[in-house]
Image (cartoon, grey):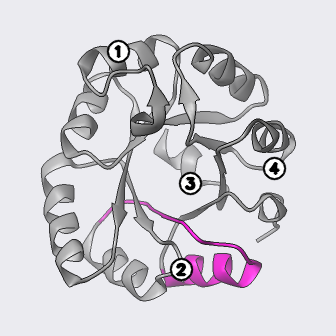
């Protein structure tokens, strides 16, 4: 299932209702729900699936959904395809429920690089997301260190930034910039 996530080179990162509607009509195969809640998550997942797309839920931003085994079980029951998280323990739990796991890392210095690599070794996520996605030097470094797909996300606002991230070794670019969701690459 990871291959189906990285097939299209753009994922829609959704925060608002307007963005959600646009993403459903776009060419993206994957929708990252960066803001959701327990009352509407099932309808969001259903709409994403009806549009022929995969639904990945950012667990830390899913209001009312526990950041624990019960919360992950809830998302699996609601037919989420996967989760995004910064937490190593959540990745391991989500894998038990057969969900695609995307672990997010914020790279701000060499220490965060080292701790990220150690977390990856422990949690073994399906995909990692490196943020901000415009740090192509670090994307290239990670692509040489880890053997898994990489999503570049954060502050990506232009076609050139998308291309740079992909050329550096990212498999997918996650962006909230609606004008990039229909790019042909």
Which disc number belongs to residue 6?
A: 3
- The mark that comes first in sequence, 1 or 4, is 4
Highlighted magenta segment, given as a residue range: 147-168
Question: Residue at horizontal 75%, vertical 38%?
Answer: 20
Asked if residue 38 is among those painted magenta in the image, a careful observer would answer no
* Label 2 SS: loop
- The mark that comes first in sequence, 3 or 4, is 3
Residues at marks 3 and 4, CA–CA distance in whole angstroms: 13 Å
For disc 4, the marked residue is 27
Residues at marks 1 and 4, CA–CA distance in whole angstroms: 29 Å
**Number of marks present in the image shown:** 4
Asked if residue 153 is among those painted magenta in the image, a careful observer would answer yes
Question: Residue at horizontal 32%, vertical 76%?
Answer: 142
Foreground mark, 3 or 4, reads 4
Q: Position of residue 118 (x, y in %)?
A: 13, 63
- The mark that comes first in sequence, 1 or 3, is 3
Question: Residue at horizontal 76%, vertical 35%?
Answer: 17
């Amino acid at each position: 299932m990871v291959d189906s996530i990285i097939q299209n080179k753009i994922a829609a990162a959704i925060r608002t209702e307007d963005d959600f509607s646009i993403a459903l009509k776009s060419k993206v195969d994957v929708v990252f729900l960066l803001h959701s809640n327990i009352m509407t998550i099932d309808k969001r997942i259903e709409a994403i699936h009806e549009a022929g797309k995969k639904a990945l839920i950012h667990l830390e931003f899913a209001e009312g959904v526990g950041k624990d085994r019960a919360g992950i079980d809830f998302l699996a029951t609601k037919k989420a395809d996967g989760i995004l998280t910064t937490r190593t323990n959540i990745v391991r739990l989500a894998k038990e429920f057969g969900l695609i796991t995307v672990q997010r890392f914020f790279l701000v210095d060499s220490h965060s690089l080292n701790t990220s690599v150690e977390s990856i070794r422990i949690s073994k996520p399906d995909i990692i997301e490196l943020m901000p996605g415009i740090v192509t030097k670090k994307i290239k470094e990670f692509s040489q260190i880890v053997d898994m797909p990489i999503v570049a996300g954060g502050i990506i606002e232009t076609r050139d930034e998308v291309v740079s991230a992909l050329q550096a070794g990212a498999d997918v670019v996650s962006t909230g910039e609606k004008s990039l969701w229909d790019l042909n690459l």
